[in-house]
Image (cartoon, rainbow, N blue to C red):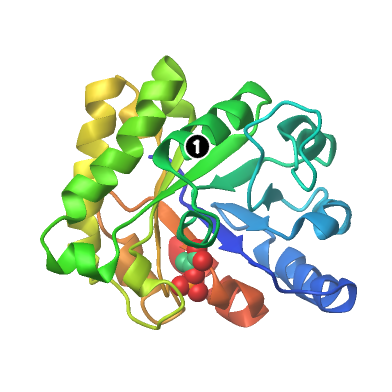
Amino acid sequence: MKKKLIAGNWKMNGSLTSNEALLQALVAGVADKECLVAVCVPAPYLAQAQGLASGSGIDVGSQDVSQHESGAYTGELSATMLKDFGVRYAIVGHSERRQYHAESDALVALKAQRALASGITPIVCVGETLAEREAGQTEDVVKRQLAAVIHANGHCISEIVVAYEPVWAIGTGKTASPEEAQQVHAVLRGQLKAATQHADRVHILYGGSMNAANAKQLLSQDDIDGGLVGGASLKAPEFLSIIAAAC
Ligand code: PEP
């Protein structure tokens, strides 16, 4: 059985001082834990996170990556630069980027491709809005989003991580029930199975108001292989409780 993966998404939060305290607490708290742990930090703090997490078993991730290799793209972060800082994961297609930066399915697929080419595992986020869920479009939406990534990445698709993040559950305190989440995860697993014989290797994370109280039940579902955790990853005791539930 593969180990669960718990990844924190710090979003645009943190400071040198608060990061140090958080990472020191996490490093102390994850010792001997039998699961995979990562923190996806704001880009200016990659070096700090890499230094503090080094040797602890906590991997460092970025929250985005450019689809371009290098050149005149002001403000962008290339996969090779991220790799220089020991980045293991890159979130791509987070709903906040799809919404505020108009990122399309095709662009997200290119970003995933660029990450993979540099040996970085993309955490590909998919998820429906509340309006789409209420219109009965959940499966169509997540399948469309994942299909673009499968199409662009071919046989490398077993190297990605998928995060199912219902948009209505992100930062709202509302969570998909374990059964609702499992239903969507099973759809995504089926889609991956049609694309690769190694679909069972792929971690499919749940994200959307995961916390210490609901993590165990969500993580006990057959196709939920971990969590992508936003708000709760900023508080060491809460994040460590989620990690404990996963291990
Ligand atoms: C996220 O931003 O990926 C996320 C899941 O946020 P939260 O846990 O705060 O809902």
Residue at 72% x, 33% y is 79
Residue 12 lies left or right of residue 168; in this view the side is: right
Q: Position of residue 10 (x, y in %)?
A: 65, 67
State the count of labels: 1
174, above or below 49, in the image: below
Which quadrant holds the N terminus? top left
Q: Position of residue 36 (x, y in %)?
A: 57, 50
Residue at 24% x, 27% y is 193
Q: Which residue is farthest left?
A: 136
Residue at 68% x, 29% y is 68
Residue at 18% x, 49% y is 139
Residue 49 visible (yes or no): no
Q: Position of residue 6 (x, y in %)?
A: 52, 57
Q: According to the image, label 1 marks what residue?
A: 107
Q: Amino acid type of disc 1?
A: Leu
Residue 83 visible (yes or no): yes
